[in-house]
Amino acid sequence: MPQSPEQSAAPSAEPQAHVAPGPSQVAAAARAAEQSAAHERAERMQPRALRMFPEGTGPSPDPAGSHFERRIRSFQPRRSRVTTGQAEALKRWWPTRGTDIDGQRVLDLKEMFDGLPVILEIGFGMGEATAQMAADDPSTGILAVDVHTPGQGNLLGLAERGGLSNIRVANGDAVILLREMLAPDSLSGLRVYFPDPWPKARHHKRRLIQPEFLSLAATRLAPGAVLHCATDWEPYAEQMLEVLSAHPDFENTQADGGYAPRPAFRPLTRFEGQGLDKGHVVHDLLFRRVGKGS
């Protein structure tokens, strides 16, 4: 019996073969899911930060916003719990001693530090060592950069209790600070103590001490200024020594071209002590900016 047009157009009752998604589809779906999750986390995080620190009264969760290109960063923001004491210190002192790295202006370091020579410190943790160095050398200003809100509050609290007027705290990406917000030859020194070593080989590109970073830093350091690095991760120390030794704008302060003994002005930090207890060897590197001013 011939089929009617309706019967001919009806879908077959036989099950259709399932076609598995290809590798590119799986990867695309995974990326989309990761981006969606990251967006949701950011959305959840930002309102809390804004409610705790209204504009101008505390660090911003994303000071540079979308003004600058996205690139591989050497740090990961950590939004761990801020204690009541840290939050109060931020509210009291951020308007006069804190600054967001928004990349929209050039800082007048002479005005910020009443004419003192200024050392930039990138990554200060909870700030104990920074506060100690500021107390030991009140004739030098320290511009301390980090993205860890509890550490920012803790350092400002330490400065308050110690009566330290030579500390300022910057919140955000140190690369944007160097590139967009500091004048040429404006720094008397640069300190990078125990940066994230990014130990996995595929993450080495995230390490801060790279030739490109050194070229940028050299333009902001005055001739003769010292870049001081310290790490307890042996492979990273070796990379630091290699790239610093090869860079034309820096020379090793050590005659033998190797690591330096820990200078007396760098305090032994709690983090360093934990590493030493585990058998880690700490290496200091002190390299001087050479050549004429920018």
Image: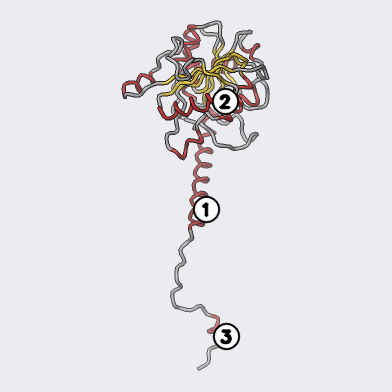
Residue 106: give x, y in percent of width and height.
67, 21
Residue 89: give x, y in percent of width and height.
50, 16
Q: Are marks 3 and 2 in contact (CB under 8 Å)?
A: no
Q: CA distance from mark 3 to mark 2?
A: 80 Å
Is label 3 or label 2 in front? 2
Q: CA distance from mark 1 to mark 3?
A: 41 Å
Residue at image point 63% right, 14% down: 109
Task: List the single residue furthest toward the front.
Answer: 256
Q: Nearer the viewer, residue 261 or 207?
A: 261
Q: CA distance from mark 2 to mark 1?
A: 40 Å
Residue 105: give x, y in percent of width and height.
68, 23
Residue at image point 55% right, 81% down: 9
Q: How many marks?
A: 3
Residue behind mark 1: 28
Q: Which residue type carries mark 1?
A: Ala
Q: Residues within 10 Å of mark 2 (few under 14, many from 20)?
A: some
Q: Nearer the viewer, residue 119 or 11?
A: 119
Residue behind mark 2: 247
Is label 2 or label 1 in front? 2
Q: Which residue type carries mark 2?
A: His
Which image quadrant: the C terminus?
A: top right
Q: Earlier in the sequence, mark 1 or mark 3?
A: 3
Q: Residues within 10 Å of mark 1 (few under 14, many from 20)?
A: few
SS under mark 2: loop
Is label 1 or label 3 in front? 1
Q: Is residue 280 above or below residue 31?
A: above
Residue 35: give x, y in percent of width and height.
52, 45
Q: Is residue 143 visible?
A: no
Residue behind mark 3: 5
SS under mark 1: helix
